[in-house]
Image: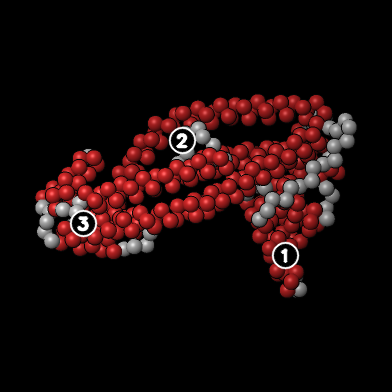
């Protein structure tokens, strides 16, 4: 669903600190949501471009892998390989079968399972377990570094919020605890806003089929916004459905209370943006610290094409070297040494 920002409160000259902070947080959330939508679009465009750029060379590589898999299968069926050579051939056949199976070709997998005492699925499970152990080791090594980064960010956020609170306090008279109204509690205000929307949008109370369908969709949006604490989305629905007073007409105490929710939502969006950026960079195979942008992703696609072209050259060279039984055995011995 496209992001629709909530209009900021009217900010006349000399506007209170509460109004200024309200607008600042709304603009911050709008900017972050726009950046998140841009990251999602960038990722989709990258995947489509990568698929297009590598389609031809991937198919060429798959055909070369099929030829090598058939050569290994024929040698194993013909009893040309024994001992370490046979085991090395099964390892290479399992590798080829895994890659071909990912492309929808199960022929090499079936040949491997017919010839090997260890089915391909079991080999893959062992490989995943070994990889998981390496990942866990990496996570343990980087945990302290991540914790330090988060602690530094938390201190920065805390200092920023303290400065904002001081700015608000300069403009908003402090209320004694006995004068704090329940509706000035941010969580209560959020729940009250949601209840108003739920009452107005209840589909079962709408006899008109078209309006019932419309209210059902709006109610789903309200549920999503309430569940995620998305205050701007609830405010937008409030103004759309209830024609309620806009935020520009709220008093400073109410705005200051709800600013706490906006800050929390903005912090969550910043974490989500960082996570999406990191995930896209990892997916594209970018070096550590290199952000995912149009230019860096284009470079990663070029590198992917070049890597596939090199894999094709290596596969052709392997096929040329393994035309004889002796050549096949020498290649298997070399491959086993390399993998060790």
Near mark 1 (Cα within 10 A), the count class, few <14, some 14-19 or many ≥20, is many
Which is in the foreground here, disc 2 or disc 3? 3
Residue assigned mark 1: 215
Way the structure is coloured: secondary structure
Rendered location of residue 200, percent (x, y): 76, 61
Looking at this view, is 259 or 37 the one in front? 37
Rendered location of residue 115, percent (x, y): 18, 60
Task: Identify the residue at image location x=26%, y=56%.
Answer: 68
In the image, 35: left or right of 96?
right
User: Vertically, is 35 above or below 225?
Assistant: above
Rendered location of residue 102, percent (x, y): 37, 57
Q: Residue 179 got which mark? A: none
Label 1 vs 2, first from the N-terminus? 1
Which is in the foreground here, disc 1 or disc 2? 2
> Visible in this render: residue 210?
yes
The reply to whether discs 1 and 3 touch (Cβ–Cβ < 8 Å) is no
User: Vertically, is 322 above or below 11?
Assistant: below
Residue assigned mark 3: 72
Residue assigned mark 2: 287
The reply to whether discs 2 and 3 touch (Cβ–Cβ < 8 Å) is no
- Give the distance between the C-alpha atoms of the residues marked 2 and 3, in whole angstroms: 36 Å
Secondary structure beneath label 3: helix
Task: Identify the residue at image location x=56%, y=51%.
Answer: 45
Rendered location of residue 106, percent (x, y): 31, 63
Near mark 3 (Cα within 10 A), the count class, few <14, some 14-19 or many ≥20, is many
Label 2 vs 3, first from the N-terminus? 3
In the image, 296: left or right of 64?
right
In the image, 112: left or right of 259?
left
Secondary structure beneath label 2: loop
> Visible in this render: residue 86?
no
The quarter in which the N terminus is drawn is bottom right
Secondary structure beneath label 1: helix
């Amino acid at each position: 669903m496209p992001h629709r920002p909530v209009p900021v409160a009217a900010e006349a000259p000399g506007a209170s600190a509460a109004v200024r902070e309200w607008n600042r947080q709304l603009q911050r959330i709008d900017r972050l949501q726009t950046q998140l939508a841009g990251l999602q679009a960038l990722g989709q465009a990258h995947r489509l471009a990568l698929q297009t750029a590598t389609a031809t060379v991937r198919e060429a590589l798959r055909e070369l892998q099929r030829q090598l898999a058939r050569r290994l299968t024929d040698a194993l069926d013909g009893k040309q390989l024994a001992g370490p050579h046979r085991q090395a051939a099964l390892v290479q056949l399992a590798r080829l079968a895994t890659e071909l199976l990912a492309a929808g070709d199960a022929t090499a997998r079936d040949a491997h399972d017919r010839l090997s005492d260890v089915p391909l699925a079991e080999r893959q499970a062992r490989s995943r377990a070994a990889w998981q152990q390496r990942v866990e080791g990496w996570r343990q090594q980087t945990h302290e570094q991540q914790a330090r980064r988060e602690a530094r960010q938390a201190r920065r956020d805390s200092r920023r919020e303290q400065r904002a609170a001081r700015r608000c306090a300069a403009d908003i008279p402090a209320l004694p605890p006995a004068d704090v109204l329940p509706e000035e509690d941010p969580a209560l205000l959020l729940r009250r806003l949601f209840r108003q929307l739920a009452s107005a949008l209840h589909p079962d109370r709408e006899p008109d089929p078209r309006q019932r369908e419309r209210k059902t969709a709006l109610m789903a949006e309200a549920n999503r916004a309430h569940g995620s604490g998305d205050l701007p989305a609830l405010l937008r629905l409030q103004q759309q459905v209830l024609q309620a007073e806009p935020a520009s007409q709220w008093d400073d105490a109410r705005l200051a209370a709800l600013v706490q929710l906006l800050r929390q939502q903005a912090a969550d969006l910043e974490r989500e943006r960082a996570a999406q950026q990191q995930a896209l960079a990892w997916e594209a195979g970018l070096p550590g610290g290199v952000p995912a942008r149009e230019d860096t992703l284009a470079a990663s696609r070029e590198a992917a094409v070049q890597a596939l072209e090199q894999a094709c050259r290596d596969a052709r060279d392997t096929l040329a070297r393994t035309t004889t039984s002796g050549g096949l055995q020498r290649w298997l011995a070399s491959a086993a040494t390399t993998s060790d």
